[in-house]
Structure formats: structure tokens, C-alpha cells
Image (cartoon, rainbow, N blue to C red):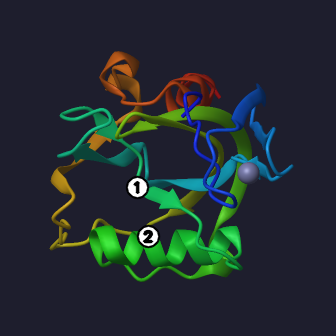
Amino acid sequence: MNELTYCPQCGKSGLRYEESKKWSCTACGFVLYNNCASAVAVVLQHRKDILLTRRKNKPGMGLLDLPGGFSDPMETAEQTCKREIWEELQIDLNPDSLCYLGSRPNKYLFKAIEYSTMDLFFRYDLLEKPKFLMCSEELSEVVWVPLKELDLNELAFESQRNFLKQYTLA
Ligand SMILES: [Zn+2]
């Protein structure tokens, strides 16, 4: 991403990377920001077990992940949780019962572009484990893991490792 050179406005190779998230064009003055994207991660919990998914695709292929994903424009974080949990698992959660727990920054490398994200963590308690869990095509499996047995090294993302390390100690 830092190597972008052609300006999307004037087409000349005047684009220069300035700092952290900003590019500007020396030819026409165009400015491009690659701002931090917001994303959610939901700790679906039943007693002392949490639900994790196994990633089928890069980044983090084969590693564990909390269900969630990127926010769409003009969505609330709670709406993102509801939409993503439905898309991934077909669990229809009540957004009013989500409990916000905190945030962690993350890096998400997708097809040679590194995106900066702000991951927002929520907890959602399930009174019972769903009998059938639909697993979307983006996932290879869905697993229930006792919090005590969670191996942080199996997680795909640094933000989740940091967050769950603290969460499992609480
Ligand atoms: Zn330009």
C-alpha cells in the first residue's frame, strides 16, 4: 500500500506516502487517507465455554477467531455484531443484550494491503448451546472451548490474544 504511486484523481505518478495513513499527490494536491476501520469480535459464552471459529481463508488460515467482522458504513457496532453473527452462525442475537468490554487495535493483512482496525469486543451470554450451528463458507469449523483450556497461540489475531489473555484471567 505504501508503494502506491499513481494518483486516482489526475492519473500522474505523483502520489507520495507521507505518514501512517496519508498519501498526497505532488502533481494535483489530491489527498488520500487509509483510515482505521472498525470491527467487532463477539465472545459468545455459555457458562465457562466460549465459541470460536476456525478460519478457512487468509489471513490466519487454520487458526481460531472470535466471530465478528468489519462494520459496514453507517452501522452501529451492535448492528455489526448482529449481522455478522447471523451471517457466520445463524444465531439471531438481541443487540440490547450485548455487553461492551473494550477495544484493541489490530493489523489485518489482506491481499498485500495491511489494514489498521479498531476491534471492539462484546460479550453475549447464551442460556444454552444451540443444537445446530450453521457454519458459513468462510469458516472451516465452529468449536466450543472451555476458557481454562484456551491456547492463546491458536488465535489468528494479536488483538484477540491480548484481549482474551486479560479476559481469561478475570
Ligand atoms: Zn494527482
Q: Residue at x 32, y 36 (%)?
A: 59
Q: At which x and y percent is residue 20?
A: 76, 28
Helix, strand or loop status at disc 2: helix
Tell me if residue 48 comes above or below residue 152 in the rendering.
Answer: below
Q: Which mark is residue 67?
A: 1
Q: At which x and y percent is residue 133?
A: 19, 69
Badge 1: few (under 14), some or many (20 or more) residues near its Cα, within 10 Å?
Answer: many
Q: Are marks 2 and 1 in contact (CB under 8 Å)?
A: yes
In the visual, does 129 lie left or right of 24? left
Tell me if residue 79 comes above or below residue 145 in the rendering.
Answer: below
Residue 11 or 132: which is nearer the viewer? Answer: 11
Rendered-image quadrant of the C terminus: top right
Q: Amino acid at mark 1?
A: Pro
Q: Quadrant of residue 27?
A: top right
Identify residue for label 2.
Answer: 84
In the visual, does 123 lie left or right of 96? left
Q: Residue at x 20, y 67 (%)?
A: 136
Tell me if residue 42 comes above or below residue 21 in the rendering.
Answer: below
Q: Residue at x 47, y 78 (%)?
A: 83
Q: Amino acid at mark 2?
A: Glu
Q: At which x and y percent is residue 137?
A: 15, 64
Rendered-image quadrant of the N terminus: top right
Helix, strand or loop status at disc 1: loop
Residue 26 in view (yes/no) = yes
Q: At which x and y percent is residue 169?
A: 60, 22
Whole-Å distance between the Cαs marked 2 and 1?
7 Å
Q: Residue at x 71, y 75 (%)?
A: 76
Mark found first going from the N terminus, 2 or 1: 1
